[in-house]
């Protein structure tokens, strides 16, 4: 049993989902501030993540993953965004939005100024212990 | 062993180090390197997006320091930690000075502890200079902007400064362990090339092993696991387990290396 536990990887869908969902929610909140939109608490976005490893078949381990993030926007509509992730063995990931839904690398705020689109690509780390 | 004896050895070794061009060059690069990096980032439009905090280097000077930390932990710190530790003992072999050194009024323990303190002290100074320089370069060239941490939370400058400083401090146990590794290799092989070169090669090998999707246990038992522990200090909630575990692993390696090195030096026959 202990050998099996020692040989296993701690990069699992559950860990990634529990890391990326709150990070995404926090980033949405910061993005709203940058865009000079009405502030909301991170919990108000009701972010949920569902992740699976690529290629299909492997359920755990570092490498390429894809995550679908479901959240509620300012108008309380449910939005779905897909991210391509590269997860390293130390528990850090780099997420890049696939598709155009989330916008490009930069956005214009209410005042017309360019701001970085924090949700276009972001990174995070989680505890693998 | 006497404190006076150790202090005398430390004083002599520090004077020797201060006179070496190698030492001056390494410490100079630790100061200048981050400024060159920050200036390059400031002037060019592309960002080091494949590195943690790389996307934020134009927004916060603290991100600059963390990018330097991520890069240095991978490629630079094993060199900084070994460059003096791997040479202090072997240089006595190279110059054939052990007989003179160990037959004077200082005991072998005095000499060993004195040289070890200097080796560890150099590693500390080099990393501290790199840390201070990278933070200063980030603040002066990019600006002291707030930092978005690894959980998407904005850290104001005063908090970012504290966390970045802690992140740099968290790599010290692993750096000291590389110094201990350099010392033992230097004592056993009597060669500066082995003393400096092998820890660097070992460090790179460990980093490559850690990148492979292998068993967690192997990755956690590597000295280099101590170089990743800072991630938990820039997340919410904070996670300390990697730092705690990495420090314990490094402490074990450190004690083993120093014990072997001292034993070999104690038994060395210099009379012949």
Image (cartoon, coloured by chain):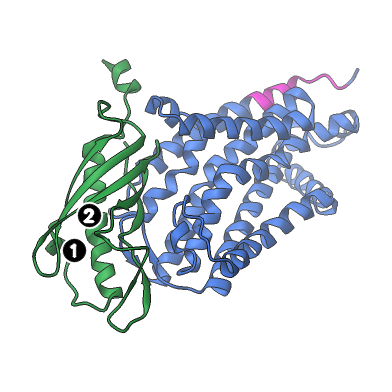
Q: Which residues are magenta?
A: B260-270
Which is nearer the eye, B233 or B112? B233
For mark 2, what is the residue?
Answer: A22
Please report the residue visible at 45 percent of the width from the left and 43 percent of the height from the top.
Answer: B228
Instruction: Kindly report the distance in space between the C-alpha atoms of the residues bearing marks 2 and 1.
Output: 8 Å
Residue B261 is covered by the magenta coloring:
yes
User: How would you rate the neighbour count of disc 1 (Cα within 10 Å): few for under 14, some for 14-19, many for 20 or more?
Assistant: some
Is the C-beta separation of discs 2 and 1 under 8 Å? yes
Query: Which residue bears the numbered disc 1?
Result: A42
Q: Up-down: is A93 above or below B45? A: above
Q: Which is more toward the observer, A112 or B244? A: A112
Task: Name the dominant secondary structure of the magenta segment.
Answer: helix
The correct choice, above or below, for B120 with respect to B109 in the image is below
Question: In the image, residue B37 lies at what x, y percent?
Answer: 62, 61
Residue drawn at point x = 67 percent, y = 45 percent: B80
* Residue B152 point in image, percent of width and height: 31, 60
* Horizontal and vertical percent position of residue B137: 59, 68
- How would you rate the neighbour count of disc 2 (Cα within 10 Å): few for under 14, some for 14-19, many for 20 or more? many
Task: Check the rendered structure and report the hue given to chain B.
Answer: blue
């Amino acid at each position: 049993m202990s050998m099996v536990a020692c040989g296993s990887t701690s990069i699992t869908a559950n860990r990634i989902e529990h890391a990326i969902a709150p990070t995404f929610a926090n980033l949405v909140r910061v993005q709203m501030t940058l865009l000079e939109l009405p502030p909301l608490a991170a919990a108000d976005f009701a972010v949920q993540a569902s992740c699976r490893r690529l290629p299909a078949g492997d359920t755990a381990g570092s490498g390429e993953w894809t995550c679908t993030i479901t959240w509620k926007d300012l108008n309380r509509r449910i939005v779905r965004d897909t991210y391509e992730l590269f997860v390293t063995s130390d528990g850090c990931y780099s997420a890049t939005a696939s598709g155009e839904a989330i916008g490009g690398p930069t956005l214009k705020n209410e005042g017309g100024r360019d701001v970085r689109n924090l949700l276009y690509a972001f990174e995070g780390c989680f505890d693998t212990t | 062993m006497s404190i006076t004896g150790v202090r005398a050895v430390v004083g002599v070794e520090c004077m020797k180090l201060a006179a070496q061009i190698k030492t001056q060059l390494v410490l100079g690069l630790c100061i200048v390197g981050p400024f060159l990096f920050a200036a390059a980032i400031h002037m060019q439009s592309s960002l080091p997006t494949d590195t943690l905090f790389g996307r934020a280097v134009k927004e916060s000077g603290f991100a600059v320091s963390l990018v330097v930390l991520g890069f240095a932990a991978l490629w630079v710190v094993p060199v900084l930690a070994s460059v003096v530790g791997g040479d202090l003992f072997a240089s006595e072999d190279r110059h054939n000075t052990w007989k003179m050194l160990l037959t004077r009024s200082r005991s072998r323990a005095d000499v060993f502890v004195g040289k070890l303190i200097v080796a560890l002290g150099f590693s500390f100074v080099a990393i501290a200079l790199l840390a201070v320089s990278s933070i200063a370069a980030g603040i002066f060239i990019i600006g002291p902007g707030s930092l978005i941490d690894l959980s998407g939370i904005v850290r104001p400058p005063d908090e970012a400064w504290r966390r970045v400083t802690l992140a740099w401090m968290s790599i010290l146990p692993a750096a000291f362990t590389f110094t201990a590794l350099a010392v033992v290799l230097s004592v056993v092989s009597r060669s500066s090339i082995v003393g400096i070169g092998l820890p660097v090669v070992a460090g790179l090998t460990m980093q490559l092993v850690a990148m492979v999707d292998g068993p967690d246990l192997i990755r956690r038992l590597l000295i280099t696991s101590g170089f990743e522990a800072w991630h938990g200090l820039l997340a919410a909630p904070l996670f300390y387990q990697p730092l705690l575990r990495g420090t314990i692993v490094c402490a074990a390696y450190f004690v083993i290396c120093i014990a072997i090195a001292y034993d070999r030096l104690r038994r060395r026959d210099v009379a012949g």
